[in-house]
Image (cartoon, grey):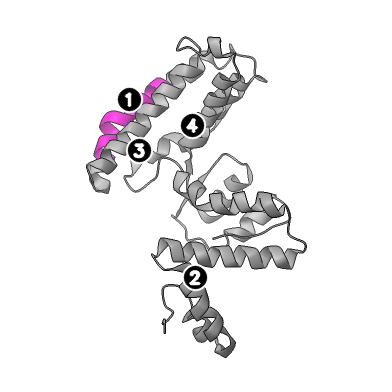
Amino acid sequence: MFGYRPSRGTDAAKALYEGMRSGGVLMSDGYEPYEAVARQHSLVHLGCWAHCRRYFHDALQALPKDKRGPDQLAAPFIELIGRLHHVEAQARRDVVDEHGLLSRRQKDSAPVLDQIKELALQHLHSVLPGSLLGKALRYVTAQWPKLERYVQDGRYPIDNNDCENAIRPFVIGRRNWLFADTQAGADASANLYSLLQTCLVNGIDGYRYLEALLVALPRAKTVEDFEALLPWRIAFP
């Protein structure tokens, strides 16, 4: 679902997630307003390991090429995070269910998490806080309760890469048109992208859906009429 807000404040986040059920799962990148959302709705709050890795990757890439060896402190973090993702990738290849994934995480991922935590705490106060590596260390330690939580349930994702990949076409397009002229236009754009993304995840041809929708939409009068036009319900001619 795409939604437009003129700001990124806490009120905007709360409005976007209004109606979430207690006990649901929210994964975020560490942006503070999501803390309030998780508390308000009693959500299981997960951290994203892809975002965490990015901090260490940026710290390593900022060094001259001849200094990016395995002896640099960022390198072992990237290697350890790679091990976590290897467990997930192997589970996907083996097509294990959520119970099998939980078992693998407890056996193979939990010890790696212990290594990451120990390494981060060991160097947290010996690196300049304002450096890229210092920011990476502060991020992983501050987000740790959320980052380690995914090993508690085989249904929890390790990162939000699927979501990031889903929004990439919108982000690339936004670079072309730069801005929406009005808030109404931004809302309309968000609604349209939400419908098309829903078609994608349901295996529905988006162009065919829009053809059927635009023909049937003028005849819709009631809530039930509009619900019948949702991508997974609409009757194609």
Q: Position of residue 103 (x, y in %)?
A: 24, 38
Describe the element under mark 2 as helix, strand or loop: helix
The region drawn magenta spans 102-116
Viewer-side label of 2, 3: 2
Q: Is residue 155 magenta?
A: no
Q: Which quadrant is home to the C terminus?
A: bottom left
Q: Residue at x 56, y 80 (%)?
A: 214
Looking at the picture, tell me which residue is in the foreground, 234 or 212.
212
Q: Where does residue 177 sit, x and y in percent of width and height?
A: 70, 55
Residues packed near mark 4 inside 10 Å, few (<14), some (14 to 19) or many (20 plus):
some
The residue where tag 1 is placed is 111
Q: Nearer the viewer, residue 221 or 201?
A: 201
Pick whichever, 231 or 144, lies toward us: 231
* Disc 4 secondary structure class: helix
Residue labelled with disc 4: 144
Instruction: Give the amino acid at mark 3.
Output: Val
Please report whichever mark, 3 or 1, sits nearer to the chain's N-terminal start: 1
